[in-house]
Image (cartoon, rainbow, N blue to C red):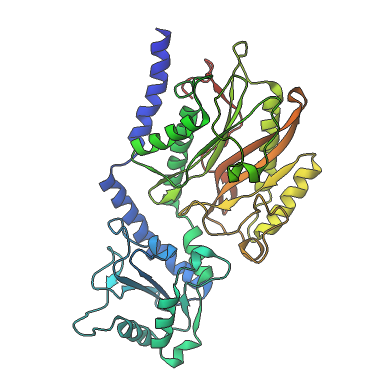
Amino acid sequence: MRKTIQLLLFVLPLIALSQQILPEVERARVVDEILEERFNVLLPKLMDDTGIDLWVVISREYNEDPILKTMLPATWLNARRRTILLFYRDKSKNTIDKLAVARYNVGKSIESAWDKEKEPDQWKRLMELISERNPKTIGLNFSEDHNIADGLDKTDYDAFMDYLPNKFKNKVVSAEQLGVRWIETRTPREMAIFAQLTDITHNIVAEAFSEKVITPGITTTDDVVWWMRQKVTDLGLETWFHPTVDIQRNQEALVDHLSSFSGKVDVDKVIMPGDLLHCDFGITYLRLNTDCQEMAYVLKPEEKEAPSFLNNALYDGNRVQDFLTTNMIKGRVGNDILAKALQGAKGAGLRPSIYTHPLGTYGHSAGTTIGMWDAQGGVMKDDGENYPLNPNTCYAIELNATVNIPEWNRDVRIMLEEPGFYGEDGFRYINGRQTELLLIPRQKEQLGN
């Protein structure tokens, strides 16, 4: 009977999880509705804010600009031939033209503006559309600092400039600010979906770090990794990076970041009682991405809870999170946020490392960068130095706290990562954060959580 109850407590959350995920046709509907809202409501405001009245986005099939990929309707998995999009904002009339120099409409929002039988040359037709509108600025996607805003390839740039009438050449500017704002800014509907997506991610992690998946003495960290990959596939979702699961344990020296990332250490280990587990995991759904790191403890036979020294270590990780998020203030650049957060955490006796990145349309998305694991002095000549924190943006609050554990005669690293939202009212976690270690096996009070 007890085993039956435990099985139901595992199965019921999984049923709820599967009910949250839409079939493909419904996903396409939601994606296109959100895209239409972004084009008609968000984009005009962003163009006004960044001072660009005409934005041209150009891509060829299978070599898509990262920004153009976010503008394609759900039924377009790639650009077609050469796809050219033109957005013209007339603020005085409060209108926005959304045109495609292509042979067909691009979804519901972007209308075809090229009849090849009348004008065989696609570039000439583009120049006609530009001349008719006589813009003050022409934004193109080239950028030194923002990779996502640097999607215009040299061939298309050269062709564009060769065809562009001389009177417009001095009006060409980088659209990097507009491109980054387009990528980073979330709408209220997207945020409602983001909460659900993060909840799904947390549920998968909780199941992975449970006795349903892990049998101490038998299961390896690689077994858990591939279980997570398979779980995501079975749910009809995708991972945007290969997950990792690692172990810290008594009497084993703490491995540095570089060795962990470079594969210099044995990453596939048998999970044993007394192990402190950590995972890094993220999924993609409805064109949004999560990025989560959580930690678990494998109980020894005589234990009912994790040792207090590990719970206290997790609390130190939460304190580092607090020093970071309280310093996330509108208009501050990433390097300033990083410096102030590190100063506060170190002043409180903590040993922090912060490497928080924008999150959303891409996993490592566009926006202000708040440190990197190998650049704790700040990110120079990049968005961490020059680009401010804007409202209605999301971040993977990624960091760690190194904590000395005398009982283990060693340091441990508490590694945490949670999706967070910065809005007009400040910062909040999108779906909460981990404040207690997951236990394997679950104890009675944790079953069903």
Q: Position of residue 363 (x, y in %)?
A: 49, 51
Residue shown at the point (63%, 38%) measured from the top left? 415
The answer to whether 314 appears left or right of 77 in the picture is right
Query: In terms of depth relative to the viewer, which is nearer, 73 or 90?
Result: 73
- The x, y position of residue 326, in whole percent, is 68, 47
In the image, 130 versus 350, the foreground residue is 350
In the visual, does 400 lie left or right of 138?
right
Residue 13 seen from this side: yes
Q: Name the residue: 41% across, 91% down.
A: 165
In the image, farthest residue toward the left: 117
Give the quadrant of the N terminus: top left
- The answer to whether one can see residue 425 in this image is no
Q: Is residue 330 above or below residue 100?
A: above
Horizontal relation, residue 285 to residue 305: left or right: left
Residue 98 x, y percent position in the rendering: 34, 71
Q: Residue furthest bottom?
A: 166
**Observer-nearest of 96 and 57:** 57
Residue 190 point in image, percent of width and height:
43, 51
Measuring 61% from the left and 24% from the top, which residue is drawn there? 275
Q: Is residue 255 above or below residue 154?
A: above
Q: Give the total of numbered labels.
A: 0
Give the image quarter of residue 385. bottom right
